Image (tube, coloured by chain):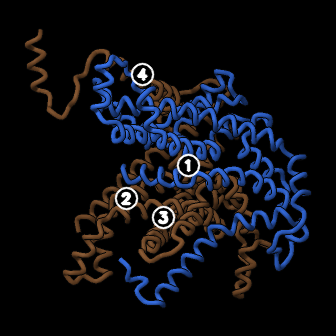
Amino acid sequence: MNEVGANKFGRVVLYIFLTLSALISIFPFYWMFVIGSNTNSEVNNMPPALIPGEFFIDNATKVFDRINFFGSLLNSFIISTAITFFVLFFCSLAGFAFAKIQFKGKNFFFIFLLATMMVPPQLGLIPSFMIISALDWVDKLQAVIVPGMVSAFGVFFMRQYVATSIPNDLMEAAKIDGCGNFRIYWNIVVPSIKPAFATLGIIQYMQSWNDFLWPLVVLKDASSHTIQIALRTLNDAYTTDYPMILAGTFMATIPILIVFLIFNRQFISGITEGAVKS
Amino acid sequence: MAEQDVAKINHVKEKRKYRPKLHDSLTGYLFISPFFILFSIFGIYPLIFTAYLSLHKWNILGDKEFVGLSNYVSLFTNDPLFLKSVGNTFFIWVLSTIPQLILALILAFLLNQAFLKAKGIFRLAIFMPNITSVVAVAIIFSAMFGTNYGVINYVLSLFSIDPINWTGSTLGTQVAISAMVMWRWVGYNTIIYLAGLQGISKDLYEAATIDGANKRQQFLYITIPLMRPIILFTVILSTIGGMQVFAEPLLFGRGANNQGLTMTLYLYEEAFTRFAFGYASAIAWVLFLIIILFSLFNMFITGRIKGQ
C-alpha cells in the first residue's frame, strides 16, 4: 500500500495535502481567538485582522455582563457529569446482563435496543416536552438529565466489551463461591472494564456537553441555561459585536478542547470500536 | 425431575456454560430495566403519542380536534414552505455528505501509508473539529462567511473573485451550511475509515501484487469491497444526521427566501414558536419515514454495488 509515496514527488504532495487539511481543521479555532481579541473596528476592515489583538479581556468582560457565563458553565458541568455517571452505571449493568446472564427474551430485547438507535430524537420532541411540563421540570436541570440517563449505544458498547473481557470460567467460579449477579458485577466486572468506562465516559460527556436541541426546548430561563444555550443567546441579541460573541465562543470551547486533548486516545478508540463492530 | 434436568442439559449446546435459572432471569430483567423503563417513557410513548397528535389539530391552549390525515395531506398539497424545507434538506445533505465522505476516504487512505511521519498529529488535528459544539461551529462560520468583512470573502478576493453574498443568496446559504456540516464531520469519518483500512490484512495486498494487480486494481477490488460495510455505516449515519440539520440554519439565518430552512428547523418552529403541536407532529413522522426509506434505499444501493 505504499505506492502513493513511492517517489519523492508523491510524498511531497501527500504531506502538502495532509498539512493543508490539518490547517483547515485548526484554522477556525485560531480565528475564533483572533476575532475575540480584536475590536469591532479592526474586525470590520479589509483586509481583516489576521493576528490576535490585545482586547480579549475587554471582550470577555462584555460577555460576562451579557450572559450568565459561569452559571451556564456550571449547569453544563452538572448536567454532563450527572448524565455520564448514570449512563456508565446503567449501561454497564445492562451490558453485563446482555453479555453474561442467560434470560428469556434476551435476543429480542437486544435487537429491540439496537433498533431504537434508528429513531431520531425529534420524533418524540413534543410529547417529551409535554411530560416535562406535566412534571413541572421546565427550567430545571433534571429535565435534561433524566431523559439522558441511558443510551442504547452505551449498552451496546458495554455488552461488546464485557463479552470479550470477562471469561465465562470466572463467572462460574464466582457462582460456585456463592456470588450473586450483582456482586459479580460489582466485584469482578466493574474493576475489569475500567478502560471501557473511560472511553464511554468521555464520549458521553462530550455529547451531553454539546447537546443543543433538547436543552433549547426545556431550559428557557437564563438561570437554567447550559453553555450552548447561553452562546446562542449571545449570538441572538441583534448584535453585530463579533469580537464579543467569538470571545464567548472561545471561552466555551477551550475547556472541552482541553478535556479532549487529554483523553483523545480513549475517545478516538471508542468511536472506531463502536463503528467497526457494528 | 432430576432425569428431566439431565436430559435438558444434554440438549443444551456444549458451548453454553451454565443454564438459565429463575434467579438469572430476574436479575437479567432487573439489570436491563433502567434502559427499557426510561426508553418507554421518553422513546416509545412519545413515538406513539406523536402519531396520535399528528391526526389532530391542536394548539397548546385549545382542545384537540380530530382531523384524520388532513395534516399530512396539507403538508404535501398546501404547504410550499414544507416542500421547500424538504428540498433544502436534501440539497444540503448531498452538498455536505458526498464531498465529505470522499475526502474522508482519501484522508484515511493517506494516513494509512506506512512511511507517513507524525501520523498521530495529523489524525488529531483532522479529528478536532468533531468535538466542537454545533453552536460554536455555527457562530464561527457565520463570522467567517460574513459578506462584507468575512475572512472567506477576503481569501476569495485574493484570487480576484467578487465577494459572495452568503446570507442573501440561495446557493450561498446552502454552501455555508454544508461547509459547517462538512468541517465537523470529515475527521470523524476519516477516523472510522482509517480503523477499517487498518483491519484489512496486508497479506491480501501482497498476494494481489504477486498476481500482478496494480494499485488501482487493488484499491477497487480489495479495499473498496472490504470497506463496504463501513462505508454503508457512515452513509447511514450521515443520512440520519443530514436529515436533522437544525442548529446551523437557526444560528446562521435561514435567509430571506427560506433557503436555509431545513425540515427539523421547520418542525421546531411549528412546534415551539407557533405551538401547532398537531401539525408539527405530522412533520416529525414524515421526517422519521424519510429517514427509514432513505436508509433502506442506501442499503439497497450498496447491496447492488456489491453484486457487480
Q: Say which chain tag 3 marks.
A: B
Residue A177 visible at all: yes
Q: Residues within 10 Å of mark 4 (few under 14, many from 20)?
A: few
- Mark 3 element type: helix
Residue A239's disc number: none
| Mark 2 or 4, closer to the camera | 4
Which amino acid type is shown beneath numbered disc 1? Asn
Tags 4 and 1 touching, CB below 8 Å: no
Residue on which disc 3 sits: B190
The three-letter code of the residue at mark 3 reads Thr
Residues flagged by tags 3 and 2 on a common chain: yes
Q: Which residue position holds label 4?
A: A182
- Which chain is in brown here? B
Residue identified by numbered label 1: B78
* Disc 1: host chain: B
Image quadrant occupied by the C terminus of chain B: bottom left
Residue A227: x %, y % from top left: 73, 44
Give the label on residue B230, or none.
Answer: 2
Give SS at disc 1: loop
| Distance of label 2 from label 1 (alpha carbons) | 40 Å
Mark found first going from the N terminus, 3 or 2: 3
1 or 3: mark nearer the eye: 3
Q: Are marks 2 and 4 in contact (CB under 8 Å)?
A: no
Give me the C-alpha separation between circle 4 and circle 1: 58 Å
Neighbor class of circle 1 (other Cα within 10 Å; few <14, some 14-19, many 20+) is few
**Within-10-Å neighbours for mark 2: few <14, some 14–19, many 20+:** many
Q: Are marks 1 and 3 in contact (CB under 8 Å)?
A: no
Q: Disc 4 marks which amino acid?
A: Phe
